[in-house]
Image (cartoon, rainbow, N blue to C red):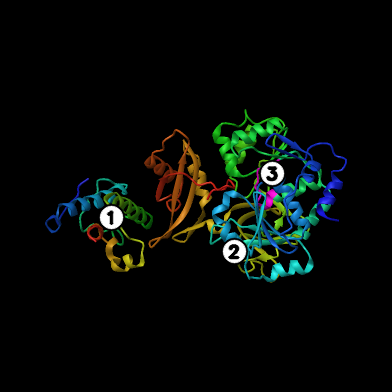
Amino acid sequence: MQLLDKLAEIWNTIDYPFFIHNGSQLRFQDIASQNPIDLSLVKSGDVVAIIGDFNPSSILTLLRLIDLAVIVIPLTTETSNEHEYFFESALVDVVIKDGVVSRRTHSKTHELIDVLRVNGHAGLVLFSTGTTGRPKAILHDLTLFLKRFETPRPTLRTINFLLFDHIGGINTLLHTLFNKGVVVAPEARTVDSVLDTCRKYDVEALPTTPTFLRMMLMSGAIPEKVPSCLKIITYGTERMDQPTLDELCRLLPVVDFRQTFGMSELGIVRVKSEARDSLFMKVGGEGVKTKVVNNVLQIQSQSRMLGYLNAPSPFDSEGWYDTKDVVEEKNNYYKVVGRESDVINVGGLKFMASDVELVALDFPGVSLVKAYPKQNPITGQHVELTVQPREGVSIDKDSLMSYMKSKLQPHMAPKRIKIDVVNIGHRFKKG
Amino acid sequence: MKVFLSSISIYPLLAMELKIIVFNVIVSLLENKTIEVSDETPLIGEGGLLDSMKLVELSLKLEDAATDLGFEFDWTSDAAMSRSRGMFRTAGALAAEFIAQSER
């Protein structure tokens, strides 16, 4: 059965909206019966980039493209300066933007795309936000990806903070559709707007990032502006720190905090937090195995990607994927303490950038921080620190430097501090 | 703090100022601020005032000072290191390198 038909059947007897967007409450039937855009130029097996967001038109087009068994690439306007690169590296045949369908010509082929075409399967391409090199085009077999949704699971009214071009966003959308849930799109991705939307529409679950949660804390919105309807806050996509989690748990004692963990390369893996105030989590789920090699987490997953379209396969011969996440292990629970690439080595002494950031975050007036290694010919590497003060606050670099020196071992103390904006990407992760 | 400018006559006024900057930065990194820094004061090795971490800090401070003065103090490139392996041995050698780079 086609996906749209299957979903129409699921929603056949449901009278509540599945999607709330910009004040409009839409039932699945309203979305399915929208005036569809003309997809006559699109053929089965095409690679199709759709530039959109979680709006009714984009969702309908996305579902229709899956039914056409195309390889779909959801993109957003936030990454428009990279679209040409995305189109090139993913061998895009068709671009859909603002309801306009246009074909591109190229003569390239890729064996992984050919496999999907031969099997008549739909595909999904997502781009990595890797910090090294250009983004990688991650190809999933979407027909297999959708199988995970065949087992019914409970849903909560969820605000979809994650983006259209992110595996978490796509996962939330499909999970909600298959399980008769409700997704609410925030009007703006600001702290106030997200919390207002939660209050207005009785949102129960807020999936977000540690950076956004820190911004919530710094803005003073917690706890007064957090509505009582909110039951669960999930956080993932970057490392959370214990002081932030402790503060969140203290200020919001009835909210359950759960960690998520996933990589576009692996599909979605199931994660269970040890406790609401613990950063330890169990990583598992159907067809998922884990092991730790040299403190780094490796994962095998049946729902893994087929491969990259513009880079060699990252899996070893047994299918293990090196997450590059340095973890601590406790009774089969893991705590991510940093990225392997975040390990700073000063004169042979290794530590994590997060160890430095944690100390800096405690300095009065500090809003955001980023510690990073710099190469030098004396100790190999040293730490430098960029600090963003809270609005209206000025930070004295010398005082901060003295403070860092008083709290950290000499090799870990930053050797240079810059007062500047700490870049936060459109996915609310520190750049 | 006392700074002994034993080679004042070699350098023009600007060079002398640069030397004072280098010596002042060195002193700012010392626990004991009463130490007298001269051309011959060893920075590293036997009797050296600075450990490797302090040396990195010193170099970065000089990099920043040079930027403020409108030139680039290069201490990280292979060329810089091979050109002046001895520049960290004494305060005078470091000052001489700092001055030389300001004139390039």
| Mark 1 secondary-structure assignment | loop
Q: Amino acid at mark 2?
A: Glu
Is residue A356 visible from the viewing direction of this image? yes
Name the N-terminal-most of marks 2 and 3. 3
Q: Which residue is mark 2?
A: A88
Q: Residue furthest left?
A: B9
Q: Is residue A412 left or right of residue A43?
A: left
Query: Separation of disc 3 and disc 1 at Cα?
Result: 53 Å
Q: Chain of mark 2?
A: A
Assess whether mark 1 and mark 2 are in contact (beta carbons under 8 angstroms): no
Q: Amino acid at mark 3?
A: Asn
Residue A102 picture location, percent across and down:
65, 57
Q: Residue A165 magenta-drawn?
A: yes
Measured as percent of width and height from the top left, residue A165 is found at 65, 52
Tell me where the magenta segment starts and ends, as one range. Answer: A159-169
Number of the label disc, if any, that sits on residue B71: 1
| Mark 1, other Cα within 10 Å: few <14 / some 14–19 / many ≥20 | some
The disc label shown at residue A179, or none: none
Q: CB of mark 3 within 8 Å of CB of mark 1? A: no
Element carrying mark 3: loop
* Residue A252 seen anywhere in this rendered image of the structure: no
Q: Is residue A298 toward the left or the right of residue B93 in the image?
A: right
Left or right: where A208 falls relative to B64: right
Residue A333 forms part of the magenta stretch: no
Q: Nearer the viewer, mark 2 or mark 1?
A: 2
Q: Position of residue A78 (x, y in %)?
A: 57, 49
Magenta region, main secondary structure: loop
Question: Which label sits on residue A55?
Answer: 3
